[in-house]
Amino acid sequence: MIGFGIAALIAMFLLIQVALRSWRMAAMAFLTLPVALLGGIAAALLIGSELSLGALIGLLAVFAVAARGSISVIAHIHEVERRHAGASAALVRLAASERLAPIAGAAAATAAVLLPFAILGSRAGLEIVHPMAIVVLGGLVTATALSLLVVPALYAQFSTGEPQKAMPEDELIYHWSGSDTGEDARSRIPVVADWEHAGSRSSDRPTAGAAAAPPGSDGGVTTAKPAKGPTRAE
């Protein structure tokens, strides 16, 4: 049983590394995941619940929610850094603020579903669901705080300071985590035309009322043709 748990943790760490493509960020996200379990453990102790099967399922659910939130925030930070072609603490705060509504909304929706099971108590038929709901509700608080506060702060502290290069497989990560895809992000970047020689170019552009020159013509510009000299008599 212990060996199976260790293998599962190693597999989760490798999956996080594949998603983030950085051993440093994967280690940071993985080592902060146990912090999310504190809320669930505290909630279970608060109601005097024992470590039952339902509580264990709730802890696993909180662990998964925290992992997804951490990957979502870090992936979005990478996308924001690529979008602005730089890396700074201000961009990390911007990315975290943009993920506030999706992560908090998902946590609120999950809490709304589990709240009735927590209120009903350990009635007949709810022996597993009730402790699971209590643990998940407590863990959602710490998991949300971990994703929106702790992970961005640690990222700003331990990042390399350079934006991560985009890869084709990143689009799948963005769709899974709820972040914008590279195409969506690039579509919001304003395109500014380069008019360094606007004065010289504007003279070459036809006016709105000017008629288009027929094909094969010189655009309406007359050029002087050289006069023919007297022909030599043969």
Image (cartoon, grey):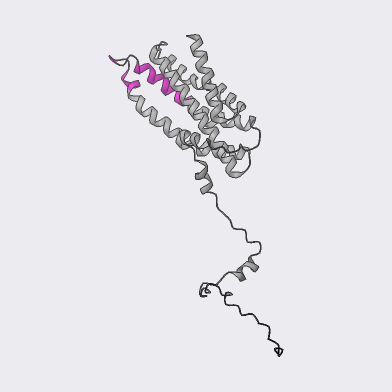
**Position of residue 109 measured from the top left corner of the image (x, y, whole percent):** 38, 31
For the magenta stretch, what is the residue range?
Answer: 117-141
Magenta-colored stretch includes residue 139: yes
**Position of residue 203 measured from the top left corner of the image (x, y, whole percent):** 61, 71
Q: Main secondary structure of the magenta part?
A: helix
Q: Residue furthest left?
A: 124
Q: What residue is rendered at 43% in x and 22% in y?
A: 61
Q: What residue is rendered at 50% in x and 37% in y?
A: 171
Relative to 132, 37 lies left or right? right
Q: Nearer the viewer, residue 42 or 207?
A: 207
Q: Quadrant of the C terminus?
A: bottom right
**Position of residue 74 measured from the top left corner of the image (x, y, whole percent):** 55, 33
**Position of residue 55 measured from the top left corner of the image (x, y, whole percent):** 41, 15
Rendered image quadrant of residue 192: bottom right
Rendered image quadrant of residue 162: top right
The answer to whether residue 62 is above or below residue 124 is: below
**So how many labels did they put on this image?**
0
Q: Nearer the viewer, residue 23 or 81?
A: 23
Q: Residue furthest top?
A: 1
Q: Residue furthest front?
A: 234
Magenta-colored stretch includes residue 82: no
